[in-house]
Amino acid sequence: MLKVVVVGADGRMGREVVKAVINEKDIDLVGAVDTRNHGQDIGILTGGKPCGVILAGNLGRVLEETGAEVVVDFTTPDSVRDNLTIILKHKVNVVVGTTGLSEEDVAEIDKRAREAGAGVVIAPNFAIGAILMMKFAAEAAKYLPNVEIIELHHDQKLDAPSGTAIKTAELIKANRDMMRQGHPDEYEKIKGARGGEFDGMRLHSIRLPGLVAHQEVIFGGLGQTLIIRHDSINRESFMPGVILAVRKVVNLKGVTYGLEKLLTE
Ligand code: NAD
């Protein structure tokens, strides 16, 4: 049985991960950490039966007491770096779903993970459909280089644009020459109206209650448009990807960035 601790276990994603881990026969939920609701059985908190795992606050202590082999982190952009420091100090493998890490952060985490001999999977999106959306968008950019990205999320999301939008833009960048899009003399009457700029393309972030995680990549060519769209209708959509990463991370060293790497290896 693979021993797993979930950090951010009382959050929207963390609760879903707890339920998914409890459902897997070869994976054992041994710990749950959050900054709130300490002392409560996480099985009950996630709407199920008591599972004997009590929500705790001290990640280091939970790692020492449980002998965890994998940690899954779905917390906040502000706390994930400190969590990773603690996890890698304990030489434990980790699956990171939390978004907001910069390229420099990822390079530093890779260095520390290799020193610790631990595997780290960081994926801005664990939904298989989103991976395909990014792959198809990267391919389309070779033929239709004019593109804008619109990502739509629930209004409690902290970072913008989403990790998925940035990753999509990076993949598109790799497949086309840098080009400044739109009219050279265009100007904004309201600041931010044209969205954020990345390598000449524009990224737009929509935040509304009722949404989960959605993205449209819109390509424009002569007399035609192509729209590639993915919708995560609920948070279960991420769970097969998270569970795959939990199983695979124990055989990895350093950072593997993006779920797509695990699908091909
Ligand atoms: P949330 O606010 O519902 O949950 C975050 C949880 O982390 C909360 O329960 C909070 O109390 C807890 N927390 C904060 N700091 C902590 C710390 N230091 N130690 C332990 N727990 C801590 O947020 P959410 O909607 O569940 O999203 C969490 C993260 O996952 C965000 O960064 C979001 O962008 C990302 N996300 C990633 C994917 C993906 O596929 N990679 C999908 C959805 C969301």
Image (cartoon, grey):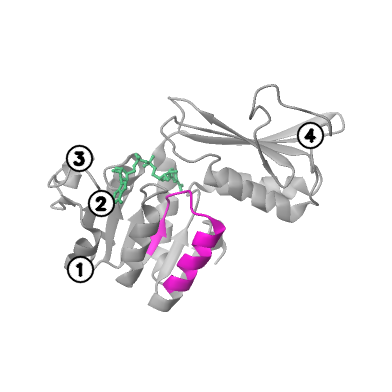
Pointers 1 and 4 in contact (CB under 8 A)? Answer: no
Name the residue that disc number 1 marks.
64
- Disc ID at residue 220: 4
Q: CA distance from mark 4 to mark 3?
A: 47 Å
What amino acid type should be assigned to the residue bearing mark 2? Ile
Badge nearest the viewer, 1 or 2: 1
**Residue 80 x/y as whole percent:** 38, 54
Lateral position of residue 110 relative to residue 228, left or right? left
Q: Earlier in the sequence, mark 1 or mark 4?
A: 1
Q: CA distance from mark 1 to mark 4?
A: 54 Å
Name the residue that disc number 2 marks.
22
Tell me the residue at 43%/59% (across/down): 245
In this rendering, the answer to whether 237 lies above or below 241 is: above
Q: Earlier in the sequence, mark 4 or mark 3?
A: 3
Q: CA distance from mark 1 to mark 3?
A: 24 Å
In the rendered image, which quarter contains the N terminus? bottom left
Q: Residues within 10 Å of mark 4 (few under 14, many from 20)?
A: some
* In the image, residue 111 lies in the stretch drawn in magenta: yes
Residue 25 visible? The answer is no
What amino acid type should be assigned to the residue bearing mark 4? Gly
Q: Which residues are magenta?
A: 94-113
Q: Front-most of 238 and 150?
A: 150
| Quadrant hosting residue 189 | top right
In the rendered image, which quarter contains the C terminus? bottom right
Lateral position of residue 185 relative to residue 137, left or right? right
Q: Ligand 1 quadrant? A: top left
What amino acid type should be assigned to the residue bearing mark 1? Glu
Name the residue that disc number 3 marks.
45
Tell me the residue at 73%/50% (across/down): 139
Q: Residues within 10 Å of mark 3 (few under 14, many from 20)?
A: some
